[in-house]
Image (tube, grey):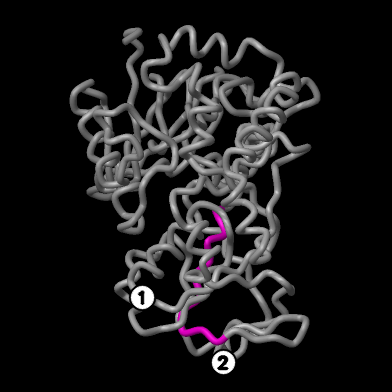
């Protein structure tokens, strides 16, 4: 729109495949406009992103990847792009924008002693497609945030014996009660213009916003009281975010640690999704998991819903050791309450890191 020649390099075969290739039951937990069906299914969002790129006539190379990014003596970047047919193209550009998400889509897979002895199947959440694949089996999901709850809920709906293993406390709020209270006056559809929403949302210093959101978090918890009391009763470890500031501050500092409830919490309360969180994993066995307190869980399938690698590792794979060593940490807040790294000075000239609710494109080159 600003008449800056730009190329987007996307490693997936189609725009939106980051959403299209995830598990079938995936829906957003934060609302989009009504024409996007509110809490949009992943497939619909993927198609929308593809449509948007076509409608806006964006210059995008799919099935392509950035093989190297090097800062030249003249301050420009040499970027070598490998295309779908295996050929390479070298660009000399003024700006490089990295849109790699929180970890470039590379799964974070913890390892435990005895894991090679386990006779069942071990998957990361990115490899899970549908509960139908594991009918009649016993499943353990390691993790207790959005993906873990989604996957466990899908298993329950298909009659699969599933246990959620919770490693640390989780902030839980229902989308029904929480979202209108957090975004109702800013970004909720019909609340006002985007300009006003942006101004209201970002005009206060972050640490003041945190204090205000302690009140909002308390208000949401009161509205969700019956659900939260039920979770406490069955032993679910509830947290309320850093210093009790709930969702937004957790998102700004950790980029996770929460579940925006769309139904799985009640299944935990009702015992339809089993819960294990009273001991640390000691090792895997041939038939499941053994815990430090001596208890064991039998499993045919173990799902890691444990997130992704760090942004630093994703950057390193694209720009190499020399440049990545100069780059500031990505995400969390600095001493002034400003976001680190994302959408601001990254530590080296004219290289930028893009993060948002739905980062979807691998690399943009402003030529």
Q: Residue at coordinates 50% horizontally, 32% vertically from top-left?
A: 179
Q: What element carries label 1?
A: loop
Instruction: Identify residue for label 2.
Output: 286
Q: What element carries label 2?
A: loop
Residue 78 locus on image (x, y percent): 46, 30
Q: Is residue 107 magenta?
A: no
Q: Which of 64 and 124 is in front in this view?
A: 124
Q: Which label is found at residue 121?
A: none
Q: In which quarter of the image is the C terminus?
A: top left
Q: Earlier in the sequence, mark 2 or mark 1?
A: 1
**In x, y percent, where is residue 259?**
55, 49
Q: In this view, does 273 lie above or below 144?
A: below
C-alpha separation, residue under disc 2 versus residue under disc 1: 24 Å
- In the figure, is residue 297 to the left or right of 176? right
Residue for point 36% across, 47% down: 27
Mark 1 is surrounded, within 10 Å at the Cα level, by few (under 14), some (14 to 19) or many (20 or more) other residues, namely: some
**Who is closer to the viewer here, 244 or 44?**
244
> For this view, does 31 lie left or right of residue 196?
left
> In terms of depth relative to the viewer, which is nearer, 43 or 155?
155
Q: Range of the magenta residues?
A: 298-308
Q: Is residue 92 above or below residue 13?
A: above
Q: Which quarter of the picture shows residue 23? A: bottom left
Task: Give x and y (percent) for residue 287.
Answer: 55, 91
From the image, tell me which residue sits under label 1. 159
At a point 56% along the width and 41% down the height, the residue shown is 315
Instruction: Please give the count of numbered marks on the rendered protein.
Output: 2
**Camera-side mark, 2 or 1:** 1
Q: In which quarter of the image is the N terminus?
A: top left
| Identity of the residue furthest to the right in this view | 335
């Amino acid at each position: 729109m600003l008449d800056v020649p730009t190329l987007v390099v996307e490693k997936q075969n189609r725009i939106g495949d980051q959403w299209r290739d995830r598990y079938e039951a995936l829906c957003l937990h934060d609302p989009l406009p009504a024409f996007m069906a509110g809490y949009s299914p992943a497939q619909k969002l993927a198609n929308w992103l593809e449509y948007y790129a076509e409608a806006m006539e964006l210059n995008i190379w799919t099935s392509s990847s950035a093989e190297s990014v090097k800062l030249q003596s003249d301050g420009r970047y040499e970027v070598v792009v490998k295309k779908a047919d295996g050929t390479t193209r070298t660009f000399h550009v003024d700006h490089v924008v990295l849109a790699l998400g929180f970890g470039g889509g590379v799964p974070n897979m913890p390892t435990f002693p005895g894991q090679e002895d386990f006779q069942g199947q071990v998957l990361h959440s990115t490899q899970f497609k549908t509960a139908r694949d594991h009918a009649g089996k016993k499943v353990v999901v390691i993790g207790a945030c959005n993906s873990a709850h989604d996957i466990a809920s899908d298993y329950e709906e298909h009659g699969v014996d599933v246990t959620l293993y919770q490693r640390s406390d989780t902030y839980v709020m229902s989308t029904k009660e929480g979202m209108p209270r957090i975004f109702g006056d800013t970004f909720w559809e019909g609340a006002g213009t985007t300009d006003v929403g942006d101004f209201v949302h970002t005009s206060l210093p972050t640490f003041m916003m945190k204090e205000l959101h302690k009140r909002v978090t308390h208000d949401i918890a009161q509205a969700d009281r019956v659900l939260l009391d039920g979770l406490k009763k069955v032993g679910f470890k509830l947290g309320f975010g850093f210093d009790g500031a709930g969702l937004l501050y957790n998102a700004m500092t950790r980029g996770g640690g929460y579940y925006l409830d769309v139904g799985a919490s009640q299944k935990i309360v009702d015992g339809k999704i089993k819960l294990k969180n009273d001991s640390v994993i000691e090792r895997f066995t041939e038939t499941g998991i053994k815990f430090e307190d001596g208890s064991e869980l039998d499993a045919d399938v173990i799902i890691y819903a444990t997130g992704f690698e760090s942004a630093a590792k994703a950057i390193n794979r694209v720009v190499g050791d020399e440049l990545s060593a100069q780059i500031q940490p990505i995400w969390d807040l600095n001493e002034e309450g400003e976001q680190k790294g994302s959408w601001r000075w990254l530590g080296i000239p004219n290289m930028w890191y893009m993060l948002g609710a739905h980062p979807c494109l691998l690399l943009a080159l402003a030529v």
